[in-house]
Image (cartoon, helix red, strand yellow):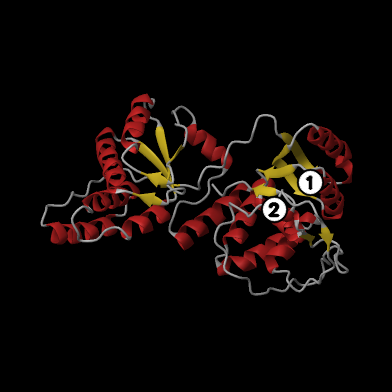
């Protein structure tokens, strides 16, 4: 395993040097990063150049070097490229600096650019949730079949008044006719109860159902489910276009559009952090030696080392080398490492410095 850390030119970024942008490869999902291979503990330290560094890398290192103003300026220049990492990093920068007005302004830009619900400032999010029940997220299975009907019935029966059902379609890889019909029936019933929804993975389930909506016998369930999903998300134009195609294909009257509260589209829920995870907090720097020593003690008695980084505000650039050394020691002892809940600025620093080759990374979601 190669660790791209010990580089000739790995000095702190020069604040006077204007960061230069480079073309990046297309980026898809920054919420789930590829873990390192815990089964291989041979470590090779390579000396490599910095030609592969991108503007995102530079922004992460500027922030790590305690240059938030320079990092902010660079990130704002990257928004035009619609790279989700730049938006996520800037949202987290404003959150950490308690700059609510700038966060809200960026949220408005985000909503206009991407035509979807923007991230919510935490204080406002907490206020909105106060006084109403929120269900646990329902992560739908990879194989969505007829058995989902009974499960949905139990969940609906157990919901509190004014609860919000959180449907996560992001794991669904296949839907059969019975599963599609069960979902369509459930969504039809809930319109009468005015149940509120939050939905993640909407685009993936829509594309999957589109591939199944053929004018053939035995496919009506897919059409019904896609119509129900469009209704739930408030996509009236898509609903009405599909309804016309449904009527033509099957010579049946299609469902009618109903004016109901549209579901809120949200990021897929982050897996719960285990209760016995080791929590790091604050700025991780030379003054954090005691925290790191406790981490090493925690790791001694566990084969799987889970580190909760949700309270980490920044990892100092000058301290990354020491942190990498400690993680390499844990890995070399035959253990696996998971770094979970870190903000986007810290997560991108970890990626730049090759820590994603040492640990599975589960960063905080943009919500």
Residue in the image at 25% along x and 36% along y: 189
Marks 2/1: CA distance? 10 Å
- 187 and 330: which is toward the camera: 330
Residue 285 in the image: x percent, y percent?
85, 46
Determine whether, in the image, residue 358 is placed left or right of residue 132.
right
Q: How many marks?
A: 2
Of residues 356 and 24, the one nearer the viewer is 356
Whether pointer 2 and pointer 1 mark residues with C-beta atoms closer than 8 Å, the reply is yes
Q: Is residue 21 left or right of residue 241?
A: right
Which of the pair 80/183 is nearer the observer?
183
List the residue tagged with mark 1.
331
Q: Residue at x 37, y 59 (%)?
A: 207
Instruction: State the image coordinates of residue 259 (x, y, percent, origin top left).
Output: 25, 46
Asked if residue 40 lies left or right of residue 155, the reply is right
Which of the 4 quarters of the picture holds residue 299?
top right
Task: Find residue 348 and report its horizontal and vertical position in percent.
Answer: 69, 56
Residue 342 vertical placement versus 278 (above, below): below
Quarter of the image for the N terminus: give it. bottom right
- Name the residue tied to disc 2: 36
For residue 359, above or below residue 297: below
Q: How crowded is the residue under tag 1: few (<14 C-alpha within 10 Å), some, or many (20+)? A: many
Kindly state the secondary structure of the residue where label 1 is placed.
helix
């Amino acid at each position: 395993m190669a660790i791209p850390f010990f580089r000739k030119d790995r000095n702190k970024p020069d604040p006077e040097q204007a960061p230069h942008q480079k073309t990046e490869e297309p980026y898809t999902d920054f919420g789930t990063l590829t873990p390192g291979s815990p089964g291989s503990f041979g470590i090779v330290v390579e000396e490599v150049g910095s030609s592969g560094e991108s503007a995102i890398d530079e922004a992460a290192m500027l922030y790590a070097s305690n240059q938030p103003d320079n990092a902010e300026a660079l990130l704002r220049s990257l928004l035009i490229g619609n790279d989700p990492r730049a938006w996520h990093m800037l949202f987290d920068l404003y959150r950490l600096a308690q700059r609510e007005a700038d966060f809200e302004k960026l949220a408005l830009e985000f909503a206009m650019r991407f035509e979807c619900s923007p991230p919510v400032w935490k204080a406002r999010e907490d206020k909105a949730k106060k006084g109403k029940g929120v269900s646990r997220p329902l992560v739908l299975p990879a194989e969505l079949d007829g058995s989902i009907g009974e499960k949905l019935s139990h969940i609906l029966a157990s919901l509190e008044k004014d609860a919000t059902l959180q449907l996560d379609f992001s794991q669904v890889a296949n839907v059969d006719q019975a599963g599609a019909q069960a979902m369509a029936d459930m969504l039809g019933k809930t319109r009468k109860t005015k149940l509120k929804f939050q939905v993640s993975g909407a685009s993936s389930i829509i594309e999957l159902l589109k591939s199944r909506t053929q004018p053939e016998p035995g496919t009506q369930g897919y059409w019904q489910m896609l119509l129900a999903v469009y209704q739930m998300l408030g996509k009236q134009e898509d609903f009405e276009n599909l309804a016309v195609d449904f009527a033509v294909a099957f010579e049946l009257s299609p469902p009618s559009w109903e004016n109901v509260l549209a579901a809120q589209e949200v990021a897929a829920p982050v897996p719960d952090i285990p209760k016995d995870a080791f929590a790091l907090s604050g700025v991780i720097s030379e003054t954090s030696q005691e925290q790191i020593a406790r981490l090493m003690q925690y790791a001694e008695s566990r084969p799987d080392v889970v580190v909760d980084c949700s309270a980490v505000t920044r990892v100092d650039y000058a301290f990354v080398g020491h942190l990498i050394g400690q993680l390499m020691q844990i890995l070399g002892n035959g253990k696996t490492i998971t770094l979970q809940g870190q903000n986007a600025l810290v997560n991108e620093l970890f990626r730049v410095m090759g820590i994603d080759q040492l640990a599975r990374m589960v960063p905080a979601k943009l919500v």
